[in-house]
Image (spheres, grey):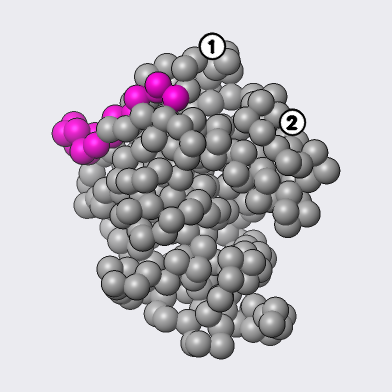
Amino acid sequence: MPFSIAHLDDAAQRLQQGRAQPPLPIGDLPAHLQPQEIDDAMAIQDALHRRLIEAGHGHPVGTKIGCTTSVMQEFLGMPHPCAGGIFDSTVRFQDGSFDFDSFLHVGVECEIAVQLGSAICASDAPHTRDSVSHAVSALFAAIEIVDDRYVDFGRRIPDSRTWVADDFFGAGIVLGEAVNAWQQLDLAGLEGVMRINGAEVGRGFGRDIIHGHPLEALVWLANETSRRGRELPAGWIVMLGSVVQTKWVARGDTVEVDITGLGNARARFQTSR
């Protein structure tokens, strides 16, 4: 049975506490508010976005795709991709500074990102790698900022649908310099390296993303969004998934990613105190 509007808002209100200032850990949702299907989770996510907009958190400008690589699927115990929102207030460019105290348990991921130059419409589904590539105007080396907003993230049975409702740990991004002439790049062969305070903590390749190619993540998102009767608008930013397992950071850390052919991005975790 679909969630009632009251239940959607109640679930969203409980999830919103993870992005309050200061943030509060999200406990288990009551049984009657727990999403049982992905569509339930996405409906709660929509309600959460409305609440975040009303609270002054900004506006959605993109989508992060989670669990597009085997390393992340194994890490999180989720066998398929999922999507969460990106808010403009959390976007930084090239060298991003974040307040460490605004997170509960902050982590970073090494990603390839795209920006759409034209919309990907539901009416054009089913989408393919060739069709979505025509909509991509730029690629970026990128860092995703994630936040473990949960009381017991390490539980043996993950509450993955609630994670989806809560934007799948999404907390911000840093985009490197836009690469507009990307069409000649071997996207499957791009190598990403992540360093924290100068020490390498992981590396991976574009081919690690689903079906061996980064744009296959965009294909998945385009078809899933079309299934819900929606489009991905021009200007939309899409994070295609991490090629390195999530790494948790400490106060004062500096994180850098370098991706061959795309350049680099940096995130600094400072304190407001």
Work out whether 224 lies above or below 159.
Answer: above
Residue 31 visible in the shown view: yes
Magenta range: 188-202
Which mark is drawn over residue 184? 1
Q: Where is residue 34 in the image (x, y as percent from the top left)?
A: 53, 80
Work out whether 42 lies above or below 118.
Answer: below
What kind of element bears circle 2? loop
Callout 2 amino acid: Ser
269 vs 168, left or right, is: left
Work out whether 138 lies above or below 8.
Answer: above
Q: Mark 2 points at which residue?
A: 118
- The residue drawn where x is 44% and y is 50% is 67
**Which quarter of the rendering shows the C terminus?**
bottom left
- The residue drawn where x is 23% and y is 44% is 253
Q: Classify 10 Å Cα crowding around label 1: few (below 14), some (14-19), many (20 and above).
A: few
Q: Quadrant of residue 52?
A: bottom right
**Which quarter of the rendering shows the N terminus?**
bottom right
As drawn, which residue projects farthest toward the front? Answer: 211
